[in-house]
Image (cartoon, helix red, strand yellow):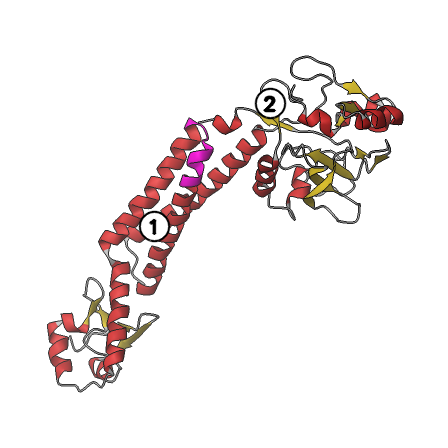
Amino acid sequence: MYENKFYIHNVTEQQGPFTIEELKLQNIDLSTPIWYEGLNDWSTIGEIEELKLILLNQPIENNPNNQITEKNKIKAFSILESKRIGLIILLFSTLSILISIFEYFDGFSPKLASIITWFSVIGCICTTTLIIVTLIKKKLKLTYFISLILFGASLFSLKIMESEHRSFINYKWMDENLNVDTFRNGDFIGEAKSKEDWVTARLNKQPAWCYYDFNPENGVKYGKLYNWYAVIDSRELAPEGWRLADSHDWWQLVDCWGGLKNAGLKLKKDGEWNSNGINSNISEFSALPAGAIDDSGDFYLKGHYGFWWVDDRTEDSSQSDIFRIADDGHGFDDVDFFQADHWHGRSVRCVDVHADEWH
């Protein structure tokens, strides 16, 4: 033993190698982690009889508080090295990966996806812990090689869940602006073909729609602009199987694609906005700058802004939430929500009425 080279650990780093004489000069006690060639795993000096006998004759001055701290540290270190804990971590990670694979082939479930995502996140944390312990000990074992593999698999699981979640969010949305001229029951919605028609519908609180510039050619690309009375009509503006998008739907879409500051380019249809970039329409939402019409029948901002009604049915208010995507040609690509007058005309998007019931 006296010819062995000894390594000790102070919890944060490994020290050595030391000869037995050098070891006596270190600030150690019987709870100090130690390893030398021929020893299967890290142990403590107090657990090795020969070393304990040698060091019993060596006076070591230690503050009692420091001894308690060191014992707590070695206890925490031992927990990280526990084979039982390691096995639980590996099983947990494996479970999350298997569930992800099953979910991938069986069909995406939004309710289960959040659970799987947290499983995967915890799996990443757990396997990272094992990998760190491996690096500290500088002793690679099969368990830790497996943890490296599971770490990668957990990350892949997260990527799958992100991809499937985005696919689900996109799938529930109608892929273009609403362009109907009847309610769900077949009743016609009045078309405003002039400023006078638009103002008259507002004053009489009648549902109405129009094309931008009152030009039917604009309807082919941009769909129709509807007033608020068409949105809240009990005959339902959305076709059978669809409903008008509410604030929850819009926020879900925005959050899915990076939040208010990042979702703009990802939602815009290629080639239809001034500032197109590498992320244009990666969401396949295909947002268009359809502009809007104000209360007096004047049109504004086609090609620069898209405005959509948020269907929160605030009939008693003169204003409602609007979802807006901006593009001023100078790098302003934000999306936002704001309160706006009911008297204007804006685009409408629908979502699948059964989307929230799937799985």
Q: Work out whether residue 337 or residue 56 is closer to the camera in this orientation and state it.
A: 337
Q: Magenta region: which residues?
A: 106-115
* Residue 59 visible in the picture: yes
Q: Amino acid at mark 1?
A: Ser
Residue occupied by mark 2: 242
The question of residue 21 being in magenta is answered with: no
When the figure is inspected, residue 173 is found, relative to residue 185, above or below; the finding is: below
* Image coords of residue 88 (percent x, y): 27, 48
Between 331 and 205, the residue placed more toward the observer is: 205
Quadrant where the C terminus sits is top left
Sooner in the amino-acid sequence: mark 1 or mark 2: 1
Give the CA separation, mark 1 to mark 2.
46 Å
* Residue 147: image tag: 1
- Give the main secondary structure of the magenta stretch: helix
Residue 114, magenta (yes or no): yes
Residue shown at 46% from the left, 30% from the top? 108
